[in-house]
Amino acid sequence: MAVPASTCALVLAAGKGTRMATSLPKVMNPILDQPMLFYPLLEVNSSGISDIAVIVGSGGATITEYLENRWPDTNTIWQHEQKGTGHAVMVAEEWWSGYDQVLVLPGDVPLIDSSTIEQLLLHHAAEGAAASFISFSPADPRGYGRVISNSDGIYIVEEKDATDTEKLTGEVNSGIYIFQTTLLTRILSGLSNNNSQGEYYLTDSIKMIQETGSTISTMKIQDPDQCKGVNTLAQLSDANELMRNRINYKWISKGVRMMEPRTVHIGPQVTLSRDVEIEPFVHLTGRTFIDRGVKVSSFSVISNSSIGQDTEILPHSMVMDSFIERGARIGPFSFIRDDSRIAEDAFIGKFVEVKKSQIGRGTKVPHLSYIGDAVIGKDTNIGAGTITCNYDGQKKHRTVIGDRCFIGSDTMLVAPVNVEDDSFTGAGSVITRDIPSGSLAVARARQKNLKDWVRRKKTD
């Protein structure tokens, strides 16, 4: 949908979130692998609105740091005193008054969908309204402002100020509005804080706009989950479950196999291909891409990584900030991290850690090894218990192992060291010097057998 060029969005994220009972600012509490604030920002941006500002207050330094790192094009506006939603919009007036219309929404509605925002924009334009807002009918309306329609028009009353009769109304306010800015500027100057909270309610602007003779329009949606606010950790847990289901069933509809989707956590920035199989209790987070034919087995975690076609991730494996190429086999109990690259048909096996290293095509590191700051060529075998000793107490050093090498079990490679193509090391060797191509390096003490030592020991 083409959004009018002069439309901006204001996200309200200044509240303390006292009922969350956590030290984090309310909108920074996580849903899946992202802060709650991520989701409304993503959906507003996806709806076509690129000019966005976030109102911050309580915990504002933390929120500002997050926005600067992850949403650098988003403006930050401080509300130093939290005097209500109307006051929040007032302090941002200098910013939004330069646009024809402003979308206002809370930062604690993570389940709102971009298509719903687009529908609101279309509805607002079609009605020629001065202000429009989304309403819905939840199963339990407690905690929400009620939407009242009568002969006087439409108005919103906050629950704490509602009469018993008004509280019987099932239609409630989502807190998501769009206003014509020229009229909003005039209305805000007349807002009063004469209410039970002593705050300036943005909801009061709806009645005030109607009193000018301008049109107010509501758009009632049928999916109440989209407008659920998050004010407690219990509600955060509910939102996490709903978001998890939304994401998982989206991928299932695109050809991803998940037999137990309730146990699988997939972040909103993950991309999956057809014919991927995900077993129970898998976590996929960050900007992860998984190609066709990959199987991710139970209790594995993949974050900010790319997994190539037909790769198998065996149980209890972790891949972080790394690249796995086509046909590789990882695990079980493998840990690959820090910009490592595992080439085609390579095998990283049981209890192996690979850190900031390149593993060549067809190379095997089957078990019980640490490979750090290393480059290993193709078709090389790394024996059990091999360690690249990359740290001298001050600096990290690189180990280079060539093609078609055989590194014997329990070899210590003390970096910096270079093992050239087609070389072998004897089991138990401590390699401190470069090994020429085609050589066998043995660096261990000669075995000495003391005859009858056991019998003599017993008689002493």
Image (tube, rainbow, N blue to C red):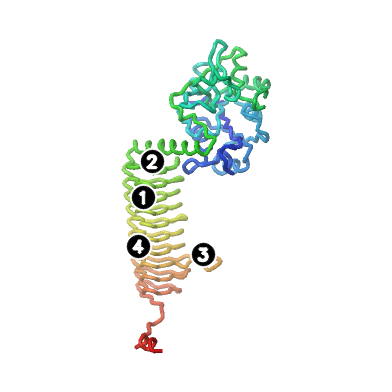
Residue at the (44%, 27%) spot, across then down: 223
What whole-number distance in Å separates the C-alpha atoms at marks 4 and 3? 24 Å
The tag on residue 298 is: 1
Q: Position of residue 254 (x, y in %)?
A: 34, 37
The location of residue 348, given as percent across then percent down, is: 36, 59
Report which quarter residue 333 is drawn in.
bottom left
Quadrant of res 95: top right
Mark closer to the chain start, 1 or 2? 2
Q: CA distance from mark 1 to mark 4?
A: 20 Å
Which mark, residue 396? 3
Percent position of residue 165, x then y: 54, 18
Q: Say which residue label 2 marks.
A: 262
Q: Earlier in the sequence, mark 2 or mark 3?
A: 2
Q: Is residue 119 left or right of residue 56?
A: left
Please give the residue where the numbered disc 4 appears in the rendered image. Answer: 366
- Pick whichever of labels 2 and 4 is earlier in the sequence: 2
Q: Amino acid at mark 2?
A: Arg
